[in-house]
Structures are given as structure tokens and as C-alpha cells.
Amino acid sequence: MSVDWRRGMSLETKYVEFCKGINGLDKIILREVRGCSAEVYLYGGHVTSWKNEHGEELLFVSSKAIFKPPKAIRGGIPICYPQFSNLGSLEPHGFARTRFWTVDNDPPPFPTNSSNKAFIDLILKHSEEDVKIWPHRYEFRLRITLGPGGDLMLTSRVRNTNTDGKSFTFTFAYHTYFHVTDISEVRVEGLETLDYLDNLKNRERFTEQGDAIVFESEVDKVYLSTPTKIAILDHERKRTFELRKDGLPDAVVWNPWDKKAKTIPDLGDDEYKHMLCVEAACVEKPITLKPGEEWRGRQELSTVPSSYCSGQLDPQTAFLCDKFGLA
């Protein structure tokens, strides 16, 4: 990375700091006045930290994560593009998470809340090396925003810049690793009664039967036609993560559990207990773009206090339960 990578940036240093991270990799820290923060590596366009105003880490990053190219970083929010998992000819989850992104000093206009000052715009374009393995030209713009209340927003815009008139097709996911206190005390709500593809059973299609998703063994499922909001309740911490999404119809839920965790070199044997991946995704029906066309996908993460209340874990209901002592 050239030394003038910050040139032209007029962002307030109070909200956006450029520095070096692990192994000297370029990193951006976003901060808000209440004390919340997020960290983003240019390697992978990868969010590796999201902390609330109390300094509590909300994302999981493995203690064995390797911050060294060409290895992807284990944890945080990897960007899966242009291929999710092994559903294609590319390396699993595509190449965007193992490429160096650059700061986008002149992004197209974003409809954005003017009160948000802690944000960074990144861009990834095709390289001649990438064209050899995926013969398409594209621009991938990523805006990462930390809201005044601590909400973390990622907005992706992918444009087909092919000059040969060819369309291209891709799948996508924000591979978000949430930090949870104890996976056996976590529930996911918003996906009940939906169909899913079970990756542990050759992607066979089933219908979710439970009133919530709970975890007692390895889970690797792609839920289809999902709602725009999903709730992840960490019962032991009395915290609910809210995931809101646009342009991403699917949701992947993954935890490797004990046996699989032992086979993953950059994951501690017992770290599966403290992580859960719930991923806003587009997997079942790939996105196709003609030259000049653009796709947008957005994910927003927030937290609210929560507790059990009449068996319901709706975040708003749970918040009222806490506030008025109804739990």
C-alpha cells in the first residue's frame, strides 16, 4: 500500500482514525461520541471489531486468527463475494475477503443520515489476476458507518463494468460473527416456519419447526425468503442483537460445534461456545448484472437489552419487559 493512501481525506479525526493494525496492516478506527467504536482493515474490507459505549466487544474474532495475506481473517464480518461457500469454481467464499481494498475518496452519492460522521468508503476493483479466475470487471463499493447510537451499518454496491457486453452472476454474504456468552443459551428469532437448505445434509430442503433456533450441535443452514429483521438473543448477557437487511433475501446460520471446531486451524477448540454466525446473504437465487447495472445490499446491526417475557423474545417487547420489570 502506497504511503499516500490517506491523501484527499477530509474526514474528522475525532470520528475516523487511520493507523496500523496487526502485522502492520492498514486499519481504520471509527468512533462515536458516546464511546462506541468499530475497526476496519483494508485487507478484506474487513470489520474486525464493534464495541458498545461500555467497551464491550460485540463481534467474535478468533484468538488464532491469522492477520496475514493470503489467509482470510477468522471472525468479524468477512465479505463473501463473488461466491458464497463452495458454490462455484472459486476459492470458498470468493476472493473479496483476501484482497486489499482502497479508500474511496470520491464515492457516488449515498442516501445517508447527516448525523453520521463516523464512516469510511472503500472500493475494490478487478485485478488482472482476478480476471484470470473470474473473467469479469466490476466495482465493489462498501460504506461502513457507525451511527451515533452505536449501530453498525454496511452498505455494498456492486457494478458490472464489463466492456465486452457480458453479464455476470454472483452470490454474496456478510459473514457476521457475533460474540455470544454461551452458544447453548442463545436463541435466534425471525426464521421460524421458514424453509432452509441444510448444508450438513447435501443442501436438502427442510422447513424450520421450532418457535426459535437453539443450539445443541453443529448448525449450517441457509434460510430462504427471510424477513428484513432477525433477532439473536444472548440470554446469559441479557442482550439482543438486531440484524436488519435490505437486498439480501437469505440468512445463513452457522456454528461448527466441538468436533468441527477442532478441525479449523485458526479457531480455538472451545471458541465455538462464544461465537455465532448469522449472515445476511443472497445464496439461493444468484444476482445477475448486465453491463452498467448495479446491485445494492445493506446490513444494519444494533443491540437492545432483553430478557424472557411470556416466552417471547421480540426485541421491542423484551426491552419493555426490562424497562418495566415484567420479565
Image (spheres, rainbow, N blue to C red):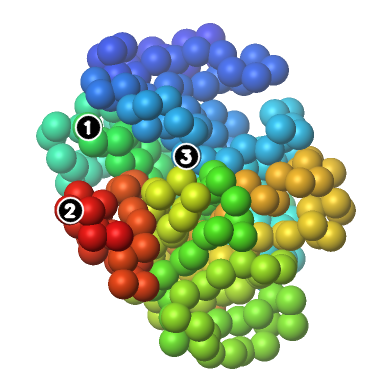
Q: Residue at x 52, y 22 (%)?
A: 27
On the image, the x and y values in percent for residue 140 come to 45, 47
Type of amino acid under label 3 = Leu
Q: Of the residues under marks 2 and 1, which one precedes in the sequence?
A: 1
Determine whether, in the image, residue 43 is placed left or right of residue 58.
right
The Cα–Cα distance between marks 3 and 2, rounded to whole angstroms, is 26 Å
Q: Amino acid at mark 1?
A: Pro
8 or 160, which is in the foreground?
8
Please say if 268 is above or below 207.
above
Q: Residues within 10 Å of mark 2 (few under 14, many from 20)?
A: few
Q: Is residue 277 above or below residue 8?
A: below
The image shows residue 75 at horizontal and vertical percentages of 62, 42
Q: Which mark is residue 324?
A: 2
**Which residue is under mark 3?**
58
- Outermost residue to the left: 114
Q: Is residue 285 visible?
A: no
Marks 2 and 1, Cα distance to the nearest angstrom?
A: 25 Å
Question: In the image, which disc is placed on residue 148?
Answer: 1
Q: Residue at x 69, y 17 (%)?
A: 23
Q: Is residue 194 left or right of residue 107?
A: right
Question: Which label lies toward us, 1 or 3?
Answer: 3
Q: Residue at x 58, y 41 (%)?
A: 60
